[in-house]
Amino acid sequence: MIRVDVKSKRFGAEAVLSGIGFTLEQGETLAILGPSGIGKSTLLRLIAGIDRDYEGTIERPDNMAMVFQEPVLLPWRCALDNVTLVHPGIGESAALAALERVGIAEKAKQYPGQLSLGQQRRLALARAFAGRPDLLVMDEPFVSLDAVTGEEMVALTENLIGETRPATILVTHSEDEARRLAGRIIRLDGQPATISEDRTVTDKGKGAL
Amino acid sequence: MAVRILSLASLFLFWICAAVLMDDPSVLPQPWALAGPFAASFASGELPYHLAMTLWRVVWAFFLAMSIGIAIGYVMGRFPAIDRWLDPWLVVFLNLPALVLIVLCYLWIGLNDVAAITAVVLNKIPNVATVVREGARALDPQLSAMAQVFRMRTLARLRHVVLPQLAPFIVAAARSGIAVIWKIVLVVEFLGRSNGVGFQIHLYFQQFDVAMVLVYSLSFIAVMLAVEWLFLQPVERSVRRWRSA
């Protein structure tokens, strides 16, 4: 279970987040919506443990994965190594299977620079799911993709989440994306940002893109 | 490649013309006049022995200066507080003449190889640290975040995330480093060792034997070119492989 209780996060004198609390069960998917610059990514960095400078407590499982806005790959290691180096425990065949699952198995020995942006994102997804994470954090993973690729990626992500069933926290500014992937939506608003809305999605999957 | 050969050939031509104009083999012998002395000192084992002694000192100094310089540069690039403390030291050592360090090392440590190599290493560390510090400052925070979230182990992180980002800086420091190091090693040998290319040059300088001075310097230049082509350039190519793929 993930328990987030951020009392306050400030950059210098400016308070960015205040009084943000929620819990999340295994297999649940939560989308965080809100206008750009509100602090969604900041909150995500706190949850992922990248930024530890805040007041409050966050309980999270050890086995965690993250999909960033950019693919954030190791450009000097081939696609397969990008998976195995991050998950030394899973072995090469499992890593290959992860590449296979996102449809880039034949690119295993190529460097990220030789892949298209869409393929790089698939690789980032493969890396995230290969370790069968208990918590998956996604920071606007579908921005800067064209409509067709974006749709493919959302569908792929939906399936992967369904297979692996991690607790998922997804930051997005697309309401459609949120309703399609998430069972619950939190909206951030205000200055400093707080939770202005926390609702369960009843028509999950029906808000077609 | 054609330009390189032509340019080297013109340097030879310049030497030949100068030797003709000088018309005094004891001041500037013709290039082919060096063949005899070269063959003789090679056959006697003298030349290979002194080349090996110098190369051994260069290798030690190179690896010590590189590893210590990389460590210091990395720490200074990552931790601004330490950088503020160490930066003035760096400036002092960067501006300390090589000769002063060599003389002080010989005076304090003694006329031995530890002093010789220490002097060279101390001369080189500040350059390596300065270059690597720039690389460490430019490390991609996104990749660090990725390594942290996925809990990559420290060693894997260093080897696969940090080192590849520092590699261009390390290669630059290594290439400029080895050129400076071997020259300082010669000075160190000139001043206080009883073997090595620098010592031999000192000996033949006192005997005013220009031919042998040239034989030793050219032989060592050849050795260092071989190091550059057989060691440094292949390493650089393998480090850059992913860029050109």
Image (cartoon, coloured by chain):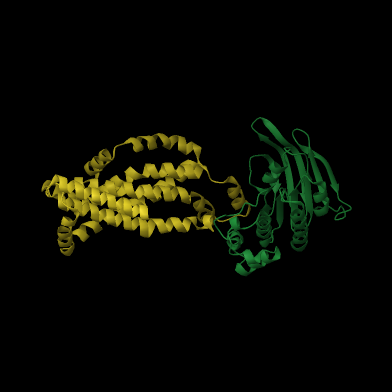
Chain colours: A green, B yellow
Most foreground residue, A163 or B22:
B22
Residue B194 shows up from this direction: no
- Left or right of B120 in this view: A11: right
Report the label total. Answer: 0
- Assign the N terminus of chain B to one quadrant of the image: bottom left
Residue A16 shows up from this direction: yes
Give x and y (percent) for residue B227.
Answer: 34, 57
- Left or right of B131 in this view: A155: right
Residue at image x 40%, y 45%?
B128
Give x and y (percent) for residue B221.
Answer: 27, 53
Residue at image x 42%, y 57%?
B235
Most foreground residue, B216 or B200:
B216
- Assign the C terminus of chain B to one quadrant of the image: bottom right
Residue at image x 42%, y 36%?
B87
Residue at image x 76%, y 58%?
A152
Give x and y (percent) for residue A24.
Answer: 77, 51
- Left or right of B179 in this view: A75: right
Give x and y (percent) for residue B192.
Answer: 19, 47
